[in-house]
Amino acid sequence: MLPYAPNWTHVTEFVMVGFAGVHEARLLFFTLFLTIYLFTLVENLAIILVVALNQRLRRPMYFFLTHLSCLEIWYTSVTVPKMLAGFIGVGASKNISYAGCLSQLFIFTFLGATECFLLAAMAYDRYVAICLPLRYGTLVSWGTCVRLAAACWLVGLLTPVLPIYLMSQLTFCGPNVIDHFFCDASPLLALSCSDVTLKETTDFLVSLAVLLASSMVISVSYGNIVWTLLRIRSATERRKAFSTCAAHLTVVSLFYGTLFFMYVRTKVSSSFNFNKVVSVFYSIVTPMLNPLIYSLRNKEVKGALGRAFSLRSWKGH
């Protein structure tokens, strides 16, 4: 980065380019992303309501699922509405203030980290249910669930504190055009006039710590689950046990695969167009797929949805 000069003008707002290359098809993309966003809101709200209203689903597994659904609603709402405004608006609709940009980055990072820890808590729940079924009521009591969920949200909230503080100490003196559809760290660092070495290193270490800590819990949990399943002689029981974990494993694979690619690296000089595609996948597409994965692979959720919304098509299940 260039050394700071006193006569430079500080940036007070940024302009988000978004998907500038699709100008001719902007209405098509607006419709597509609006549909995905609305569908994400509806299906996650449906899961929250169904679990809240159905006594049969008052269990730890679904307690964590409602937290995940709440998180997905906020996760997409942080970025998608502003992106949609950029597709159909002009001028100020693509602008975001300096404080607004840092706030968006803080909330997005907070929710992303919380989801990592929440998926780890769900993996622990599955481990105890399959490997230690006789101790499940003791190890995964309601008090334990509440404490685990609270810890996930608290640690997630603390995760972006240092990275955002270091970002706020950088100088932005122009240009102020962010080559992204939300205020992510990499495109912001590319605009800074300051030395970003410390900030890049901190981002790398914080991202690595969050992803490794949560993925280690998931890996150990599912390693023990696989070992337990291999010792079950009945193929029917093995399939039944694995089916309870398959949905969670699918969500974890989708989410962690893109996050490791995006954030566990130290350089910002990469293809922003490719980064935007990956960002769309983990910030917009995955939150839409998660409720589908959980509901379509779970007979209890399907049955509860069918009873709640009186859909004949669900009755066969």
Image: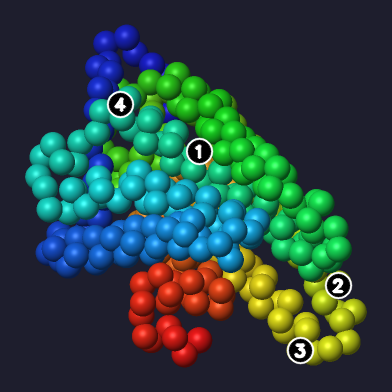
Pointer 1 or 4: first along the chain: 4
Dots 3, 2 in contact, CB < 8 A: no
Pointer 2 or 4: first along the chain: 4
> Could you tell me residue 102's position as x and y percent?
38, 30
Residue designated by label 3? 236
Point out the frontmost of discs 3 and 2.
3
Q: What's the amino acid at mark 3? A: Thr
Quadrant in the picture for residue 60: bottom right
Residue 56 located left or right of residue 223:
left
Residue designated by label 1? 110
Residue designated by label 2? 228
Point out the frontmost of discs 1 and 2.
2
> Could you tell me residue 238's position as x and y percent?
78, 82
Distance of label 3 from label 2 (alpha carbons): 14 Å
Distance of label 2 from label 4 (alpha carbons): 52 Å
Pointer 1 or 2: first along the chain: 1
Determine the residue positioned at 38% across, 16% down: 4
Q: Residues within 10 Å of mark 3 (few under 14, many from 20)?
A: few
Determine the residue positioned at 48% across, 28% down: 164
Distance of label 1 from label 2 (alpha carbons): 34 Å
Q: How crowded is mark 2: few (under 14 residues within 10 Å), some or many (20 or more)?
A: some
Point out the frontmost of discs 1 and 4.
1
Pointer 3 or 4: first along the chain: 4
Q: Is mark 2 on a helix, strand or loop?
A: helix
Distance of label 1 from label 4 (alpha carbons): 18 Å
Determine the residue positioned at 49% across, 22% down: 165
